[in-house]
């Protein structure tokens, strides 16, 4: 079995599918999994229709992509725990020791970069499908090569993937420039409610359960909104808080560079990277705003 994390993104799905294609090509029997399904913007990924939300174990081998622990992959974490052997491929810095084999590189912009090196190293055959999946992983985790995590290696790997027919402009258009109508209306409401703290350091906004209901939108439609929240000139941190149907509050944090938002997210049981992190709070929306802004204000 190969799985990515809960609330999947282009990196986790791209890696799961690239590995699935590569391993099937050498005769391995693979079950690709994603507990939370596939967001609309990633349904074009080759093989996306084969991702299952659950499976029956036990498996000979569990591979976790873009996730370091069974907790991060949701319900199928139980299958990972009971698998005979385990591999973790990830670019998040974490204390976890799960996985007999751990291929973890926090300097990689995307787990897709690591998977590329692995496939190369194992001399597995590359196809356009695999290249599309891995370039999607890189394009999405770097915001189309705009984030601080991009390195020369990111471009070298991407150039190699283009050699196999993958197209960054096509992927950017599919993932970033194509949105549902409710998702755009949601962006409008989020920007309308945008606020900046008195010291001008933090810009933040909320999306309420009422907003979601009135627009017929889901949390999937909030993808990318936090980037706009952080865009206010002079601010260092952008925060998007949204009220989910189950009563919990999901928080996305983005920073330019002065604040390590992964530390803040970890304090509330979440995680991520220095410049991009998230967590979920089991409080009211107002309490969540107070807690998160309080923690950010206290941060150096
Ligand atoms: Mn990633």
Image (tube, helix red, strand yellow):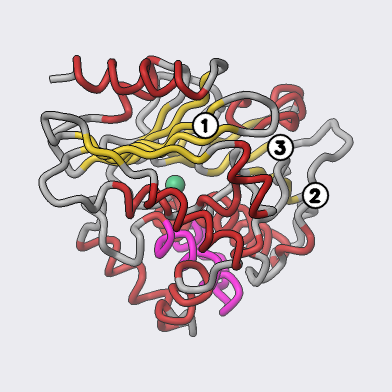
Reading the image, the residue beneath label 3 is 61
Q: Nearer the viewer, residue 189 or 251?
A: 189
Q: Which element is circle 2 on?
A: loop
**At x 47% / y 81%, what residue is drawn?**
170
Q: In this view, which residue lies farthest toward the right?
A: 56
Q: Is mark 1 within 8 Å of ligand 1?
A: no
Location of residue 250 in the rendering, given as x and y in whole percent from the top left corner:
52, 31
Reading the image, the residue beneath label 1 is 250
Q: Which mark is residue 236?
A: none
The part of the chain drawn in magenta is 118-140
Location of residue 4 in the rendering, given as x and y in whole percent from the top left corner:
61, 43
Left or right: 167, with 254 as reference point = right
In which quadrant is the N terminus drawn? Answer: top right
Please tell me which of labels 1 and 2 falls first in the chain.
Answer: 2
Q: Residues within 10 Å of mark 1 (few under 14, many from 20)?
A: many
Q: Which mark is residue 52?
A: 2
Q: Nearer the viewer, residue 43 or 123?
A: 43
Left or right: 50, with 174 as reference point = right
Q: Residues within 10 Å of mark 2 (few under 14, many from 20)?
A: some
Q: Nearer the viewer, residue 88 or 203?
A: 203
Of helix, strand and loop, which mostly describes the magenta segment? helix
**At x 20% / y 20%, what residue is drawn?**
297
Against 151, residue 66 (above or below) is above
Q: Which element is circle 3 on?
A: strand
Please tell me which of labels 3 and 1 falls first in the chain.
Answer: 3
Q: Is mark 2 within 8 Å of ligand 1?
A: no
């Amino acid at each position: 079995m190969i799985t990515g994390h809960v609330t999947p993104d282009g990196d986790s799905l791209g890696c799961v599918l690239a590995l699935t294609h590569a391993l099937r090509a050498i005769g391995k029997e693979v079950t690709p999994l994603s507990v939370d399904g596939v967001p609309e913007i990633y349904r074009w990924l080759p093989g996306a229709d084969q991702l299952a939300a659950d499976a029956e174990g036990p498996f000979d081998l569990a591979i976790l992509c873009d996730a370091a622990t069974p907790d991060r992959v949701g319900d199928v974490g139980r299958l990972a725990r009971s698998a005979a052997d385990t591999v973790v491929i990830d670019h998040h810095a974490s204390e976890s020791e799960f996985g007999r084999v751990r291929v973890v590189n926090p300097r990689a912009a995307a787990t897709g970069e690591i998977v590329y090196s692995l496939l190369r190293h194992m001399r597995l055959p590359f196809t356009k499908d695999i290249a599309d999946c891995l370039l999607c992983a890189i394009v999405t985790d770097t915001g189309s090569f705009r984030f601080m995590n991009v390195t020369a290696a990111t471009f070298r790997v991407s150039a190699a993937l283009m050699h196999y027919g993958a197209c960054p402009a096509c992927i950017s258009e599919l993932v970033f420039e194509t949105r549902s109508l409710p998702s755009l209306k949601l962006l409008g409401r989020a920007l309308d409610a945008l606020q900046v703290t008195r010291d001008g350091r933090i810009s933040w906004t909320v999306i309420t359960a009422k907003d979601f209901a009135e627009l017929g939108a889901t949390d999937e439609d909030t993808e990318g909104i936090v980037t706009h929240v952080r865009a206010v000139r002079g601010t260092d941190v952008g925060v998007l808080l949204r009220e989910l149907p189950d009563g919990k509050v999901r928080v996305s944090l983005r920073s330019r560079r002065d604040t390590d938002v992964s530390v803040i997210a970890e304090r509330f049981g979440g995680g991520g990277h220095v410049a991009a992190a998230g967590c979920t709070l089991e409080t009211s929306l107002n309490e969540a705003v107070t807690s998160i802004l309080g923690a950010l204000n206290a941060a150096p």
